[in-house]
Image (cartoon, grey):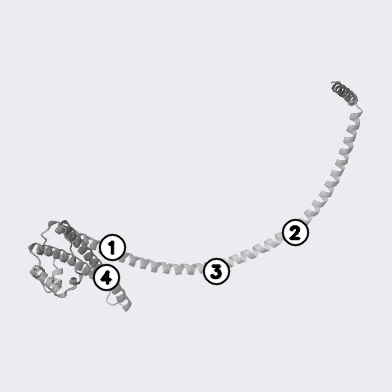
Amino acid sequence: MAEFGFNEHHQNEAINYMRFARSKRVIRLKTIDSCFEDLKDSRLVEETFTVDEVRDMLDGLQLVVRGEVETELINTAHTNVLLLRQLFSQAEKFYLRLQTDISELENRELLEQVAEFEKTEFKIPNKTNQEISKPKLAPLNEGGVSELLNKEISRLQEENYKLKGRLRTLETQAMGALDEKTRAERALKDLQKVQGEQQTAARSQDITSLEDTVAALQEDYQKSLSVNAASQRDLQENLMSAKHDLLRVQEQLALAEKELDKKFQQTSAYRNMKEILTKKNEQIKDIRKRLSKYESDE
């Protein structure tokens, strides 16, 4: 890497970063391979497929692979930003200002030199599949980075196993749901047929019952009309009789009151009370005259 202006320390740092990038790339490629294997295990269970089924499988695979690649590209961009942040922070401690030339990132000649350096340093074989099929990654010198990578690999493998198991469970549930749907549709058709026959018989019975009910109601109505007419006549007669009785009772009460007044006026107690009231009135008149005369003298 002398042509890049790297000293030994810079070269070691570049090798460490390339190891990190290679390990992430290998993990992502294994994930993409597992997507194809999952498709083979879950969907390729029949000998023949229709055009729509093949198109549906390819569309689903496209979404999964696209998501994995997009995730890796985004993660790579974010990782590069963190690397630049570290470099800028270290440079600021020595009051240095670093500048980047984005156009150099697409320099084909320099990119080929980096690729050649990677082949030389890591001894990459011609076939990429041989590297992907290796059970383990190349060991790293840094213990912290190696531990993080191993944890990430274990997490991804465990997540992959869980997703496969969930996919199988969902497929089993989907097949069971389809069977239940078919049975439910058949049962619904049979039930509708039986209900149709029962409803026809029930409607005929209801019509007969309604006709009988209407006839009985008409008969009751005619009877009630005759009964009401007779009862109305009786009520009118009773009302007239009650009016006559009331007039007679009122006349008798008036006569009784007159006789009572006459008898009371003829009693000695009534005469004595009348004389007492007359005397009291005269006394009151006399007292009023005296008072008026007393007031006029003063």
The amino acid sitting under disc 4 is Arg
Q: Is mark 1 in CB contact (under 8 Å) with mark 2?
A: no
Label 1 neighbourhood size at 10 Å, few (<14), some (14-19), many (20+)?
A: few
Q: Which residue is mark 2?
A: 225
Residue 69 is drawn in which quadrant? Answer: bottom left
Residue 37 x %, y %:
22, 70
Q: Are marks 3 and 2 in contact (CB under 8 Å)?
A: no
- Sequence-wise first label, 3 or 4: 4
Q: What secondary structure is found at the residue carrying circle 3?
A: helix
Quick check: can you spot residue 135?
no
Q: Residue at x 88, y 38 (%)?
A: 254
Residue picked out by circle 1: 166
- Circle 4 SS class: helix
What residue would you read off at disc 3? 200
**Residue 102 can be seen in this image:** yes
Separation (CA) of disc 3 from disc 4 = 60 Å
The kind of residue on which mark 3 rests is Thr
Looking at the image, is mark 3 or mark 1 nearer the viewer? 1
